[in-house]
Image (cartoon, rainbow, N blue to C red):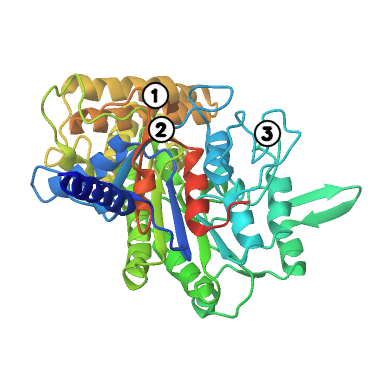
Amino acid sequence: MKRLLLAILVLGFSTIFLNSCQNKPTESKIKYAFLFIGDGMGQAEINTAQAYEMAINQKIGFKPLTFTQFPSVGWVTTYANNRFITGSAAAGTALATGYKTNIGRISMNPDATESYESIAELAKKQGFKTGIITSVSIDHATPAVFYAHQPSRNNYFEIGMQLANSNMDFFGGGGFKDPVRVINNDTLNVVKKAIENGFTVVNTMEAFKSLKSGSGKVIAIAPRLAGDAAMPYVIDGNEGNPSLADFTQKAIELLQDGNGFFMMVEGGKIDWAGHGNDAAANIHETLAFDEAIAVAKAFYDQHPEETLIVVTADHETGGLALGNGGMEYNSNLKALEYQHMSAEKFDLELIHYCKQLSSDNEKAFAGLMKLVGDAFGLGDTTKIKLSSNEVEKVKQLFNDNIYSHIVKGTEPSEANYQAITFHLLRLISNKSGLGWTSHAHTGINVPVYAIGPGSQLFEGIIDNTEIPKKMEKLMMIQE
């Protein structure tokens, strides 16, 4: 009897030990680590992109994206040290360093007296190569937190100079917002300083394609930039530019030789489209972000035992919902297929059109509606029909914001043009069955998806500060 009890106990302890070993995170060192940050990309943005992909094929459901098929899924809290609804600098600092900070800080403590070391800097010190990629300017808050330390995210020149003086291996995407400063009659140039520090700077497709292993430290800027030194919105066309996926592929090619790499890739204009409540632009940015993740997934498939991919967001932007009061239980996401440009580009088209207007109100408004139909499909009886009341509302906005200035001989302000554009975007969302609660960030939890050894560490509800700490543990680069 005693032997039987002993055997049962031994068997029980063996089973517990076996199960604990199976559930224990892998001890194998991650050699290749990707952190993808969809700026402003909440779960609603992901689901909207998925549902749109089905709707344009006249189907109902969610089309799987590359990262939505990753085996490990969790939720991330995003609040900042001094505000519940965070900003990109504070949230980025948490994702880069593992520490909470105040709004606007770039990898510094709340009172800006101490710098926090980022996962990229730590990885570089311990022999990894490093890459920072974004679709917005490379000195913007999210990319900046991985290589710079500033009390304010608005210190673009200072951030740029810290980039130029860094030892990171690859920067790719947008340009610099404030690259030149005159101090004591001395002209300082970020790009010139970077070249002096050993960077190769390219901004043509030919030079970008010619980059290969052994090129040294690289800053690859998209040849064609839009507002604020960012890459153009995908919906506006990216001809002549590398895509976010192209930048990711090139970084892999340049960084994979050696002891491994850490790479951060940001889909930055998901956030910008969210601020503008521009649903179609938001969808196209999310899908382009997923294409970049697909490049990393293809690399993972070749190195599954030593590659980790983590996909998350710094916060949600816009308070997007798949549903609204007007449509109630109906949806028509296919309507977004008729939008052919971003709000940013439409503003420019509207300004160009209005500068040529005569005092003939009916003719001026008819021309506007043609422009609106071409850009968004609104008012076109074969695309998105508008009621007489909806047309009258557009006309009232046109008269109040544009035509009244023409009559007076004054120049409409940027806000005048945007009032019309914002209304048109709201009309499109209403007709599509989407709702927005804000033009700012929201405080909801954002998702995290992961694949690779140890990916189960990212399951459940975690704080954004835990993401770099868990990645550092798996890369075995913790101090």
Q: Which mark is residue 97?
A: none
Instruction: Residue 363: give x, y in percent of width and height.
Output: 31, 33
Q: Is any atom of residue 240 visible in this view?
A: no
Give the left or right position of residue 164, taking residue 324 as reference: right
Q: Which mark is residue 317?
A: 2
Gap between marks 3 and 2 measured at Cα = 25 Å
Give the left or right position of residue 86, taking residue 424 as reference: right
**Mark closer to the chain start, 3 or 2:** 3
What residue did someone put label 1 on? 438
**Mark closer to the chain start, 3 or 1:** 3
Pointer 2 local density, CA inside 10 Å: few below 14, some 14–19, many at least 20: many
Give the left or right position of residue 146, taking residue 32 as reference: right
Gap between marks 1 and 2 measured at Cα = 8 Å
Give the left or right position of residue 32, taking residue 373 as reference: right
Type of amino acid under label 3: Asn
Q: Residue at x 59, y 44 (%)?
A: 97
The outermost residue toward the front is: 1
Instruction: Residue 135: give x, y in percent of width and height.
Output: 48, 53
The outermost residue toward the right is: 184
Please identify the quarter of the rendering in which residue 367 is found. top left
Type of amino acid under label 2: Thr
Which secondary structure lies at badge 1?
Answer: loop
Type of amino acid under label 1: Ser
Please identify the quarter of the rendering in which residue 114 is found. top right
